[in-house]
Amino acid sequence: MREYEMMVIIDPDLSEGDIGATIEKLKDIIVSDGGEIENIDEWGKRTLAYEIRHKKEGYYVVFYFKGKPTLPDKLRRELRLNPNLMRGMILRRGD
């Protein structure tokens, strides 16, 4: 298993429940594919460097996890299709 780090920016206009559900959905994808979540850092609302979708803030969350080499592709698909996610990036750690 490889080590990964994923940062996502969630729409800040969502309710706390919707933000929590979005985080849970990402956790479920990782765990259902046999991955292990090491840590989740919720940074909260932060000002963006530039506007995304006409918004000046975003809710930042960083996931640290281990998984198979195919797991990032499944997560990238969710990042593209989920309307609650404004941006996301997955990096491989430990190189």
Image (spheres, helix red, strand yellow):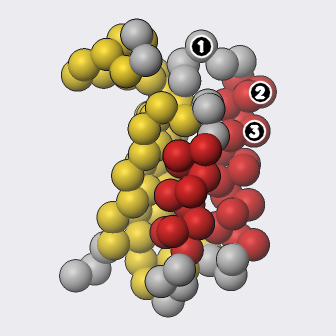
Residue at x-position 73% and y-position 60%: 28
Q: Residue 85's x, y, as percent?
A: 55, 35
| In the image: residue 46, left or right of residue 15 | left
Answer whether residue 37 is visible to the viewer in this image.
Answer: no
Few, some or many residues within 10 Å of mark 3 (<14, 14–19, 20+): few
Residue at x-position 70% and y-position 23%: 16
The residue wearing badge 2 is 17
> Tag count in the figure?
3
Answer whether residue 77 is visible to the viewer in this image.
Answer: yes
**Mark 3 residue element:** helix
Q: Are marks 3 and 2 in contact (CB under 8 Å)?
A: yes
- Tell us which disc is closer to us: 1 or 2: 1
**Mark 1 residue element:** loop
Q: Are marks 1 and 2 in contact (CB under 8 Å)?
A: no
Few, some or many residues within 10 Å of mark 2 (<14, 14–19, 20+): few
Residue at x-position 41% and y-position 70%: 4
Between the C-alphas of marks 1 and 2, the distance is: 11 Å
Q: Are marks 1 and 3 in contact (CB under 8 Å)?
A: no
Q: Amino acid at mark 2?
A: Gly
Vertical comparison of 82 with 63: above or below: above
Vertical comparison of 78 with 22: above or below: below
Between the C-alphas of marks 1 and 3, the distance is: 14 Å
Q: Residue 81's x, y, as percent?
A: 61, 44
Residue at x-position 74% and y-position 28%: 18
Q: Amino acid at mark 3?
A: Ala
| In the image: residue 94, left or right of residue 66 | left
**Mark 2 residue element:** helix
The residue wearing badge 1 is 13
Few, some or many residues within 10 Å of mark 1 (<14, 14–19, 20+): few
Vertical comparison of 40 with 43: above or below: below
The residue wearing badge 3 is 21
